[in-house]
Image (cartoon, coloured by chain):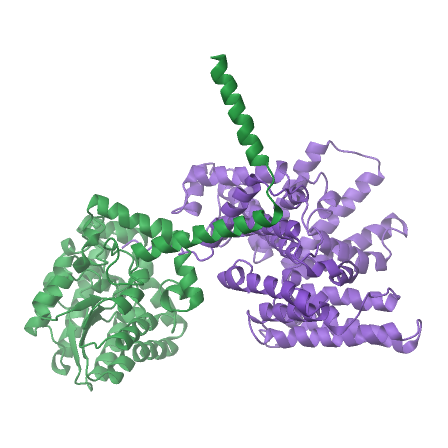
Amino acid sequence: MLNVSSRFAGLRVRIRSLMGAELHDARWFWTAVGITVLLLALCGLTVYVFNPYMRYHKKPLLSPVYDDEYRMVPHLLETADYDSLVAGSSMSLNFSLADVRQILRWKKPLKIAVRGCRAATHKLLCEKAFKNREVRHILTAVDVSILAKEPGSHYIPLEPWLYSRSLLHECAYLFNADIAFGANRDVIKAHLDNAPRLNPDLMFNTDDCSGRARYGKEQVLKALRSQQRSETRWIGEMKQHDATNLVERMMHNFDEGYLSLIRAHPETEFVLYYAPYSDLYWGCVLDEEMLDFLLDIKARINGLLHAYPNVKIFDFQAETAVVTDLSNYKDISHFSPAINRLILERIAAGANRYTPENAGATAEAVRAIARQGAETLRQMGL
Amino acid sequence: MLFSSYEFMLFFLPAVLAGYFLLGRVAGKMAAHFWLVAASLLFYGWFKPWYLWIILSSVIVNYAFVWKIERLPAGGALRKALFALGILFNLALIGYYKYADFLLANCNALLKTDFPALHVLLPLGISFFTFQQISCVVDAYKGVRLANLGFVNYALFVTFFPQLVAGPIVHHQEMMPQFDRPESLKPDWRHLNCGLHLLAVGLFKKLVIADQVAIWAARGFDSPDPLTFFQAWFVALAYMMQLYFDFSGYCDMAMGLGKMFNINLPINFNSPYRATDIQDFWQRWHITLGRFMSHYVYFPLGGSRHGLFRTCLNLLATFLVSGLWHGAGWTYVLWGGMHGVALVLHRLWNAAGFSMHRRLGRALTFLFFLFSLVLFRSSTVDHAVRIWRSLFDFSNMSYETIRVLVRPDFSLHASILLIAALTVICLTCKNAVKLSISFRPTWVRLAETVFLLTWSILTMARISPFIYFNF
């Protein structure tokens, strides 16, 4: 016993003397610098090999987790093989790429939709795609209310080192704890769990991938009670502040984010669609006295688009069977992947096509849906 | 360029260090100094290239004043006129870039005028390099001999990059002789090691600690809703820690970098939260600013030479100026005023022969600074009053309310523990500069340096946590 404790005491003394021992000054400096460089290099190597955001090569060591569209899309646009795009906001996130291939018969679609996609983000991502590949088709959602956001702004600040390439940006990417420890860990964990988020056809899907989404009236009302009114309220407040400038801003944003691309790429087919928000969404819009304003902007947009033969417009906002059934929704505007599939089927069949002839009837139908939505809100005390 | 950036750590610093010592060996002192000036200008211009015009014109004009004043006979009218012009030039420069909009806003409010704001972009570090040059002009006028006053040396004294953007505010008498020493041109491994260690500590304090608690402080101060009791205390403490770890971290980096070039920069923070009274606090917090204010504001006003009443007035005036130096806003002036009043009370307390137990004094000083920082950080006085009220609002005493400030990256208890631990560290541990005095190149220090340096570099570019809209 005594022998063991004296051994430990001896070991302690040895460790202490080793730790306290002084190195030659120059050796200390170069060892410190050398180990730091080595650790950084190791970290950079793991980021390069695991390649969790698909920045460097098509086939990383483990297939990536497709759940962070803002960080992956800029890289996928450079490394993935694609000839068509599924773009736009969260309205487009739940499209399955397998469905796009099967129903629209597009050969190599890539999803570049991002949550809260603003005009500047749409333009940035699409231009990056045009720069890197030949793009034949783009399917994109037009969210009229988002056009009211500040020109040039993005839903979240875009880290410059993720969206452009330079030596310093490569350093920021490679020597990065969030990627080396965070994103790499997520990849490993997803593989251990065999998570559905690894399926590239369901990339960025907010439903099957996360497993969090629930649909139905209860979920919608919960979301509405918590914060969703603010989404329609802010635009109402803006209009009250300066309606003329708001119209100019929205049309400017549309021109910047969409029309400029349509003009610059006549060889590409642009399939634009208005997503089926629920009747409660339109009820909120009506309550804010914004309905006519938004429908007017939509009519102006359609009027502009009509001149371009490479554009097809589809409108699902008056799709009564969908928008009045809250079991399709998880909040007042976001719907289930089944509706995304329905949208694809309708587009493939040429249904719900916007024409100047049916524009008036569609707007009237939306007004009726809005009145119904507002009535439902009143009945529920919301 | 920031110290805490990839361009600085991976490219600029190694290149400038190597170039400095290499030039010092093969081409001599002047070439090495010229290299350092050029590197410092690159460092400064990296933020915005047009900043260079401001700093260069400031250096050239001030050098001309100092050079001429030194050569004119003492007491001469021209010397006096040049001195006045020199001071005026510096005040006009800082006044235009830092205070123009503040003055216009106050003018509009007082005189009911309608002058539009100029929205002048504030060049980084202008308060620091202007103050340093004011001290040169004043000293030249007073007849203090400025050692080795060549243009390159003068430019180096002003632009030396470790202290250019955020201090410490250095004095030519402590800098120029150091640059002049022949041994400063040779790499000194002891200095390099100690400097690297200080740099690593400073980076860690800034990037890993201050930047994290800054998120919590910002969420609290920017919250449109009134804070609860525990939220208010948490936020105020978080800001107190942020400010200390951020600024003292920067100063540690500056001192470390200076040391790597064989230049000792003065200490700026000496465990200020351990101060036992407010006077002691200002001898430990932003020491070089306090020194400047004493030499160039408090003493010229008469200091403590004209009785207690004048001393108190001088103290108050000095701290109002100090408050205004911190920022162009009434919250800063009032903050300075608060500290001035505290120092006056302390002076009266001492004059009356009272004393206080050290621990009680320390607690009171700590709490006073915490309260004053609420005003310092708030956008308006009303905003500060709202937070002060929350600090004593006992209507909601659930500490769980802190959770909304710290999620999603931290758990409630981890964040409280972290703030508590940081407070204990500030109150009990030796600071980095003191540790560096007894620095020895051991394995422990090596492991510490590697760990802090690597972790800091890996956190220079963060993926901003974003709470997605819950749809």
Query: Which part of the image, by quadrant, shows the N terminus of chain B?
Result: bottom right
Placement of B122 over or under B192, stated as above or below: below
Residue for point 79% across, 73% down: B86
| Residue B102 appears in the figure | no
At a point 84% along the width and 56% down the height, the residue shown is B299
How many marks are shown on the rendered structure?
0
Q: Chain B: what color?
A: purple
Question: Chain A drawn in what color?
Answer: green
Residue nearer the viewer, A50 or A339: A50
Residue most extreme to the left: A349
Query: Residue lying furthest top in this view?
Result: A1
Q: Quadrant of the C terminus of chain B?
A: bottom left
Residue B341 image offset from top left, x and y in percent: 74, 49
Q: Relative to A150, say whether B5 is above or below.
A: above
Asked if A251 appears above or below B162 in the picture, the reply is below
Q: Is residue B357 visible?
A: yes
Q: Foreground: B224 or B433? A: B433
Where residue B362 sits in the image (x, y, percent)? 68, 37
Residue A263 figure quarter = bottom left
Horizontal relation, residue B342 to residue A377: left or right: right
The single residue placed furthest to the bottom in the displayed view is A307
Left or right: where B214 falls relative to A183: right
Residue B33, image quadrant = bottom right
Residue B382: x %, y % from top left: 57, 55
Residue A362 lies, in percent from the top left, at 14, 74
User: Residue sitting at 34 percent across and 59 percent down?
Assistant: A230
Quarter where residue A93 is shown: bottom left
**Horizontal side, residue B330 vs residue A264: left or right:** right
